[in-house]
Image: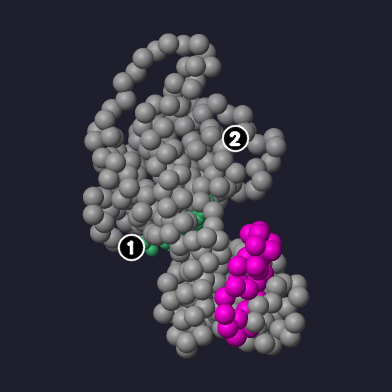
Amino acid sequence: MAVLLCSTSESVDDWAEALRSLSGIDLRVWPDAGDLTEIDYAIVAHPPLGVLPSLPNLKAVQSLWAGIEHITCDKDLDPTVPILRMIDPGLTGGMTEYVTMHAQRYHMLAHEFDLQQQQGNWQPRTPPLASERKVGVLGLGVLGSDAAKRMADLGFQVHGWSRRPKTLDGVTCHHGDDGLFDLLEQVEILICLLPRTPETENLIDSTTLNAMPEGACIINAGRGELIVDEDLIAALDSGHIAGATLDVFREEPLPADHPYWTHPRVTVTPHIASVTRISTALPVVEQNLKRLMSGEKAEDLPGLVDRKAGY
Ligand code: NAP
């Protein structure tokens, strides 16, 4: 089975070395792909436009990332080629560690005490208990549902939002447009773990921000396009939104002159909320390749992307 590794983002040499340790695979590393007609499967992270459509016998694409818009943006890619996004315990666990840490900082008012410290201002305030704090999670997929459950385990009142109705132990689930506003009106800490689709782009704008309680805080580790930046900055400037932790941006790296860098109420992290680690992702790739080699259909494997829904 010929497999093409094509990555312009993940460490391609480390992945190539790891994949060569798997048996039964004729690994090609882009751009040394050899005879393109021989390639059965592609393993990719941010492949250049045109590479995947140039493989005439491609049976499936395994993404090394959870988000797949860097693949589906190639309009020449045959829409019937199955895409598997990365679902691995390291990616999920890492994201849950990131969002729970930042949510707990907001819960404990660390963002307010940071500002007070800069002003030499000794102003005691008592945070509520976790059981008195409502937290919202937008996106209840692999990452969002794990984060929501962990926040519930920590004692918070957790609300979640998805496209379709869902049931999750310990989480009050909402869905659809009305469900979004039901959630936003209550939650003081909002965790965004939505994929980028035409429906989720610009979801966090002045209308949705204004629906949240005064002093609410936001953590966005989904995609930068979820947020209308000007609206968030205006809400932060007015104090309506008291803090934002942003890991993903419309333009990455975040441009040097972007107001987020210096805004006193913004924490910027460089798209590291959760990264694909070879140690936990390689077994996933190996398992999927084994199943494909044994004749299973890509459609039956975990992480199959719904090309119509866009995630
Ligand atoms: P997933 O399993 O596909 O889950 C996506 C969730 O979003 C689902 O619950 C889905 O609803 C919901 N959703 C999609 N469109 C919606 C809409 N229009 N309205 C309401 N809910 C909607 O994805 P995942 O693995 O959790 O990953 C989520 C995203 O995290 C990725 O797409 C990627 O952009 C981002 N990510 C970021 C990093 C980072 O380091 N910052 C790392 C990994 C991933 P249903 O349940 O109804 O389908």
Residue 267 vs residue 210, the one in the foreground: 267
Please indicate, yes or no, whether residue 265 appears anywhere in the rendered image: yes
Q: Nearer the viewer, residue 200 or 287?
A: 287
Q: Quadrant of residue 73?
A: bottom right
Q: Quadrant of the N terminus?
A: bottom right
Q: Nearer the viewer, residue 163 or 193?
A: 193
Seen in the image, is 262 located left or right of residue 282? right
Binning the other alpha carbons within 10 Å of mark 1 as few (below 14), some (14 to 19) or many (20 upward) gives few
Number of numbered callouts drawn: 2
Which contiguous range is marked in magenta? 1-25
Q: Mark 2: which amino acid?
A: Tyr
Q: Image check: 73 left or right of 165?
A: right
Residue 211 lies in the magenta-colored region: no
User: Residue at horizontal 47%, vertical 32%?
Assistant: 243
Name the residue: 40% across, 12% down: 123
**Residue closest to the eye, 125 or 80:** 125
Q: Secondary structure at mark 2?
A: helix
At a point 52% along the width and 60% down the height, the residue shown is 279
Taking the spot 44% from the left edge, 38% from the top edge, the residue there is: 102
Residue at mark 1: 164
Residue 17 part of the magenta segment:
yes
Establish whether ligand 1 lies closer than 8 Å to the Cβ of label 1: yes
Residue at numbered disc 2 = 260
Of the four image quadrants, the one with ligand 1 is bottom left
Tell me where residue 201 appears, x and y as whole percent: 51, 54
Q: Which amino acid, by three-letter code, is at mark 1?
A: Arg
* Residue 209 showing in the rendered view: no
Give the mark nearer the N terminus: 1 vs 2. Answer: 1
